[in-house]
Image (tube, rainbow, N blue to C red):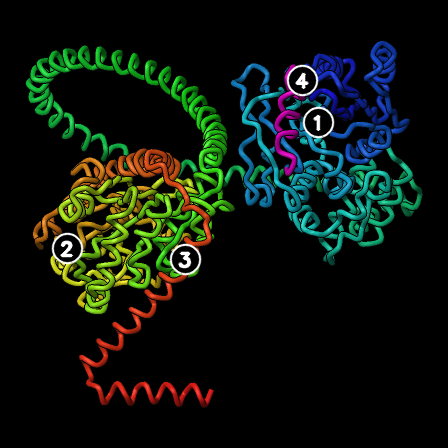
Amino acid sequence: MNETKVSVFLPTYARFKSGHLERAIQSVLAQSWSNFELLVIDDGSIDGTAEYVERCASSDPRVKHIRLEKNTGLPAYALAKGFAHANGQYLAWMFDDCELRPTHLQNLMKALLENPVWGMVYARAELNLSGEKNHDLGAPFDAARLASGDNFIPNVCVVLPRSTIERVGWYDPHVLLKRLCDWDLWHRISQVYEVGFVDEVLATEYGFGLVGSLGRASDLERDLVMRYAATMRNERLMPNELSYEDGFRRDLGFDLNNDEASRLELSFFGHAFSTLDVPRAVDFARRLAAIDVLHGDIRRFARQQGAPATSDAELLFVASKGYAQWRLARNAEAIIDCELRVRHLLDVADQRMALIEIQQGEIKAVREEVMTVRESEQQLVEHLRIYRDAADQRMELLHAARQEVDSSRALADQREGQLQVFQQELEDLKEYASNRQAEIVELRQRCYKYRYNDGFNLIADGEIPTTAIVRQVLTRLVGAAEVHTSVGQQFDAKTLAARATIFSRAFDPALARLPRLIRRAGGRYALYLDDNFWECDATPELQAFFAAPSRLHALDEFVRHATVVVVNSGFLAERMRRRFPALNISVVPAHFDFSLIADEPPAAITSDAPLRVGYAGTTRGAAFDAAVEAIRRLLAKYPGRIEFEFIGFVPEALRDLDGVTVIDGHADYGQFLELKQARRWHVGLAPLLSSPFAQAKTNNKYREYGALGIAGIYSNVEPYASSVDNGVDGLLVDDSVDAWFGAIERLLLDREACVRMGRRARMQVRERHDVDRVAAMWNETLSAAQLRAIEDRWFIRIQFAWLLWRGRQRVRVKGHADFVRQHGWVAFVRHVAHRATSRKVD
């Protein structure tokens, strides 16, 4: 900080013999801020000042002596002469009747450097009154007070950047501002910059009442000063451009009447006379005579002398006498004004004394009341003593409790530090585990590829979500390039001979004899099923489709001859074992791919925000009946505190209610999950019918809600009954309005339980249903089944081609027979003829 140089200006005149100048200089040289220069500007002193300052400069290079050979009496002009020798980035002021505290520059510079927007900074000063009680000078900055002419800023406690002077200009050396040139500069700076204040006494002033001080020796034409200070002068007050003549400028920027012009000339004359500038005083005397200020005195002087007063000495004598009379008249006016003020104060004092007598009577009456109150007070004191004893006991208990609290806080701070360390270690372990997990996945795939060297055939009934699910798991085992997908009948015997085969949903009547052929050809295949097709109660169209005897026969054939059947539901496995007692069934949980969602915490819940409840999926029909009525009641009971959102399906009874929002879904599963996560639900609904078909499905809603950290409310049927730990990672409810209402209301009122269930569900889904974990279970199942491809021989290829052709013909004949049964032979003949005609046209 001390690298910044400060230039300290000290103007002086005839203060050496009194000892004031030596005290001032030594207090500057003793500053704790060492990087400064002291510029002593001697305004023509003849009392030994010059010799003393030269001795100081020769012994301390920080002191510079600038001497004006003739006394100007204008401190602003003298300081401007010193500015040309200043090298500091910052400027400070010192005066020969002042003394600085050792930390003066240190404290002011610290404040100024910390606040670069300030144009200047000042502090308080102590006014020494020679034996009387000292007073502080200075107050917090008040722009309006300063503009009114009240100079509350001690000039000895000011520091400002050199750039401020380069913009605002220097002190104005005009005679009118001789006593107030510092106030004028502070006022001009405050109109451009912010002004800072340090609330600390940093200097002492001894000049009050000293002989020769400006406050005692100079006139103050206040009305002219205030008008002149209001004019714009910054550009012509640059310190290097000021001259002594600027102190006697008659163009003040406004017009003067005769009285004002006379007073201005008298001020000029008084200054020249006091500084013994005889030529200039004579010139001003002539101007006073020219404007009729001295004509009467000149005529009287001429009559007394018997000759006209024309010499310079005579003019100077008359002018000095007139100036002295003017000063005496001004002083007399001030004394009269002071006497009037004293008389006014005495009148006010008499009025106050009368009021005091009245108040004394009132005080006597109050004292009597006080005596009565004191008697009551003694009784209260006794009660207070009792209460105080009790309070002391309570304070002792409170002190002990505070000590326990302090100990607990210290322990908590220690635990907080340990927790931060543990959190950092946990983040490092997560990163390490993530890297190891990627390596494990890669190693697993290498092992799987070695085991299933040729990959898999995946033969499905269509390119549907179920197909994508099985393909994703198999891809985890052998990689995407080794999973060869065929849809419908788009495969041949060569495909089956190339690698082991997994069928997904096989109920094509044309392929009903394929399982037997595969077994005869030495093949072993797996079958994946995700629905109870034998007991379908979905839409009428789906029921008719799956209930067709030819499809059920084909499905039964694929099930009977499969080496292993993979399902995701224990309920479906149990239903199939009843139908196929000797069947090898493996129950593998359905998986969830966490890479499809962002790794972010679940939605936060605040007590004042509404609870967001959502559902996303297809039509659920009667499964939603009880939940619909419960939702209507909740919206009526808690308006504004709960919101419901539906993606895709919404019950018609809820569509137009306030508090219900409907959002379009996405066909792409990844985009669907992104949308669901973006909605930031707190609670998810999962109603399901209690039917053999519905209960055989996978726990899809549980996996999705849990992975997103959403607390789910599920029907108390399979597959949710065996997946959800009721009250821990979700809620199970019976199919009634009260059950659904109570479960949703519970999570609405107990927000902490809602957050806790969502977090627990997320942990459970990651532990049970992560895609890599499920892929490992598939590997165990397929490894135990020892799948293999069929033998690649010519007669097997012929049998396969004959099987496909015969199966297609049977399907075609079966379709014709069904058409004749429904519409008759005549309609059938017309239908065949129409198709034949259509082919000819084509």
CA–CA distance between discs 2 and 4?
97 Å
Q: Nearer the viewer, mark 4 or mark 1?
A: 4
- Residue range highlighted in magenta: 102-117
| Secondary element at image label 3 | loop
Q: Residue at 56% of width from left, 37% of height from top?
A: 141
Q: Which mark is residue 668?
A: 3
Q: Which quadrant: the N terminus?
A: top right
Q: Is the magenta stretch mostly helix, strand or loop?
A: helix
Q: Is residue 311 visible?
A: yes
Most foreground residue, 524 or 126: 524
Q: How packed is label 3: few (under 14 Cα within 10 Å), some, or many (20 or more)?
A: few
The residue identified by callout 2 is: 689
**Disc 3/disc 4 C-alpha distance (Å):** 85 Å
The residue tagged 4 is: 99
Kindly identify which numbered label has been placed on residue 213. 1
Q: Which amino acid does label 1 sit on?
A: Ser
Counting from the top left corner in percent of width and height, residue 412 is at 33, 18
Q: In this view, does 428 lie to the left or right of 313?
A: left
